[in-house]
Amino acid sequence: MDESAAQTRVEWHEWGPDAFELAAQEGKPILLSLSATWCSHCHEMDRETYDEPRIAANVNDGFVPVRVDVDRNPRVRDRYNMGGFPSNVFLTPDGEVLTGSGYLGEDGMRQVIDSVRQMWDQKGAAAGRVPRSVQGNDTPAGELTEDIEIQLLGQLRESYDERNGGWGSAEKFPMPRTIEFALKREQEQALRSLNAVSANLLDDYAGGFFRFAANPDWSGTHHEKLLDTNASLLRAFANAYLYTGKDEYRQPAQATVDYLTGTLWNGDAFGGGQAAGAGASYYTAEPSDRESAATPKIDETAFADWNALAVDALLTYHAYTDDETARRYAERTLDYLTAELVDDGVVTHFRADDGTEGEAGLLVDHARVVSALTRARQVLGADTLDTAQNVADHAIDTLLVDDSFVDGPREGLGLLDRPLRPLDGNVEFADALLDLALLTGEDRYRDVAADALAAFAGAADRFGVRIAAYGAAVSRLLYAPLVIAVTDEPGSDLHRAALRMADHEKVVVPNATGYEESSAAYVVRGDSVADPAYDPETLSRRVSDAME
């Protein structure tokens, strides 16, 4: 049980069969509390609501209270999330949803408790419902056409905030994948958004990016720093540097490398993130005061998906800058992933020092590990493709259902045995499979990626900017992506030049075979292969010609 929950008066249970059996035996609803170690509002609700004696007594008497860490239990999170954290969800003993909400103060919690008790007394378990996302409905399949990318470009232009940068008119999340989509298609929007992110979300004192801003003008910062946010932004800033060569994008990326390797490194890999601190006062204090203040708590749990994302980002930055710190920590993290969390193609979400471990075989873990392994092949020439194929094949064998992927094993308590087909997870895995197909020459990975993307194409006209990465993946599928095959050693001038060609969606194949000339680079677009280039200048011309 997490420290915050343990300090309340509520008698929390772990998510598991004992809690569900107790609810069934006593005929009580379950109160599921979704929380996170980094979530300041979660800890505030523990202090202000769950530690209030009368509320705690009502919860203990009338419900079976269950606390779940959302980072350690992503399948529970994705089925029961009420739109943010904390989420407070009332369930039947079978795990169906009665009602739920976000943060609740004392008065709000009393009202909800009374309402749920009345509902339970009148209808019992019959009041439960299964959310639409896990009802087993077919995905909105359709044809993959160039209109998808065009429609998402239209979404970018329509929702872009010309005044403040970023997209949308409410809270501002950095949306690094949307930025990467825009870098190649609406570059001015992408760069202005990155400028807003670095101006408002970057910790100038210790490095690293905060999670988001509550207001449209990027004010109201939420000061938690999560590994996935920082890794994703590191890659986005690195890719902006690739296109522009400007230090205003390299410097935030470097500061993020320093934060990851100096603060979140746990000795083997990267911890999950750093909390905001009490009232976020630590981050708003003067630097001199921060030096003497207690540092906000760090969750040292090494999650497979977030660490794989960090490997991808660090190697991307190394590819463009030759930064040795980024390379060294990427290699150490990849060694940890493959030695400790990957076993015969199966990825385990985490293994903690306290002996606990996460679920195995989750879609996003597999997608991001494949991406990290293929990035290592491209940038370092590492011998990682066999492992990447094993990881990909396991996910295809176990998670591919009717042309799209479910998020994990279809088993478990509550709603975990019901299929959830996450669009973003399917997009990430499809993108990873496209890279794997180009690096291995096995078209079967491309075929699976095409089916997974097409499974959602019928709703593409309704996708918002947060899913812009779908448009990038479809574009890579429809139009032969840029491939640079280098018949030279990794790290050579020609290989380094290939990595720095200004298209972040390209694939670079070092030590390429099947070409006549050694120490040469070949620009490949589909079935078209340009004449060999023997130096970076000629390669640049070949790439420019191929991109016209």
Image (spheres, helix red, strand yellow):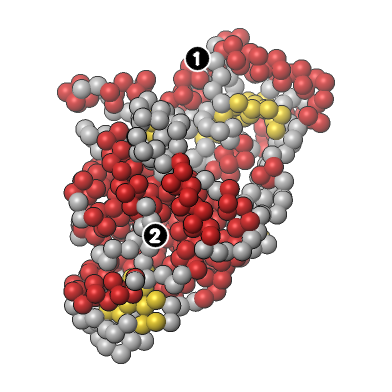
Q: What is the x, y in percent for residue 198? A: 28, 39
- Position in image of residue 23 (x %, y %): 72, 29
Q: Nearer the viewer, residue 362 or 472?
A: 472
Which numbered disc flags the more N-terminal residue, 1 or 2?
1
Which residue position holds label 2?
372
The answer to whether 452 is drawn above or below residue 253 in the figure is: below
Q: Residue furthest bottom?
A: 516
For numbered disc 2, what is the local secondary structure? helix
Q: Quadrant of residue 108?
A: top right
On the picture, is 179 further left or further right than 22? left
How many neighbours does mark 1 have within 10 angstroms: few (below 14), some (14-19), or many (20 or more)?
some
For the point 34% across and 71% down, the residue is: 548
Residue at 27% across / 84% down in the picture? 532
- The residue lying at 33 percent from left, 87 percent from top is 515
Label 1 amino acid? Glu
**Mark 2: amino acid:** Ala
Q: Are marks 1 and 2 in contact (CB under 8 Å)?
A: no
Residue at x 31%, y 80% (from the top left corner): 522
Q: Secondary structure at mark 1?
A: helix
In this orientation, does residue 235 appear? no
Q: Which residue is identified by label 1? A: 48
- Look at the picture and state if 270 lies above or below 443: above
Report crowding for label 2: few under 14, some 14 to 19, many 20 or more residues within 10 A (C-alpha): many
